[in-house]
Image (cartoon, grey):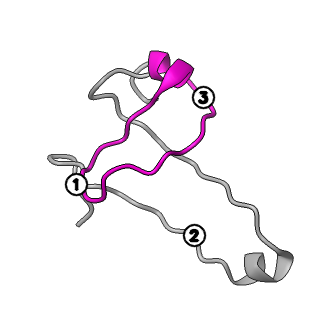
């Protein structure tokens, strides 16, 4: 959380596609306020051969509506 310096680990629940919204539930919700700027780092389990060809993505949403351009 760039606004308050909080760091947290949590899980993912898929939301509505193209909503531009990230929702935190449970204990994680107490670490973030509406409008905070977040940096998200995600992890995945994969086999070694899959990891060798994996191409990570960097995503920078439009700050006016949080949608991907």
Image position of 1 with respect to 18: above or below: above
Residues under numbered marks 2 and 3 in contact, where contact means CB atoms less than 8 Å apart: no
The stretch drawn in magenta includes residue 4: no
Please give the residue where the numbered disc 2 appears in the rendered image: 56
Other residues around mark 3 within 10 Å, as few (<14) / some (14–19) / many (≥20): few
Please give the residue where the numbered disc 3 appears in the rendered image: 8
Q: What whole-number distance in Å separates the C-alpha atoms at marks 1 and 2?
A: 20 Å
Q: Residue at x 47, y 27 (%)?
A: 25
Q: What whole-number distance in Å separates the C-alpha atoms at marks 2 and 3?
A: 21 Å
User: Closer to the N terminus: mark 2 or mark 3?
Assistant: 3
Q: Is residue 58 left or right of residue 67?
A: right
Residues under numbered marks 1 and 3 in contact, where contact means CB atoms less than 8 Å apart: no
> What segment carries the magenta color?
6-31
User: Closer to the N terminus: mark 1 or mark 3?
Assistant: 3
Q: What whole-number distance in Å separates the C-alpha atoms at marks 1 and 3?
A: 24 Å
- Majority SS type along the magenta span: loop
Q: Residue at x 47, y 42 (%)?
A: 39
Where's residue 69, x and y in %?
A: 23, 67
Q: Residue at x 26, y 50 (%)?
A: 20
Which mark is nearer the camera, 1 or 3?
3
């Amino acid at each position: 959380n760039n606004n308050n310096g909080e760091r947290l680990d949590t899980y993912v629940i898929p939301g509505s596609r193209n909503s531009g919204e990230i929702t935190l539930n449970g204990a994680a919700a107490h670490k973030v306020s509406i409008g905070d700027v977040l940096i998200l780092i995600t992890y995945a389990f994969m086999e070694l051969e899959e990891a060798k060809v994996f191409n990570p993505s960097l995503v920078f949403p439009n700050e006016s509506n949080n949608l991907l351009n």
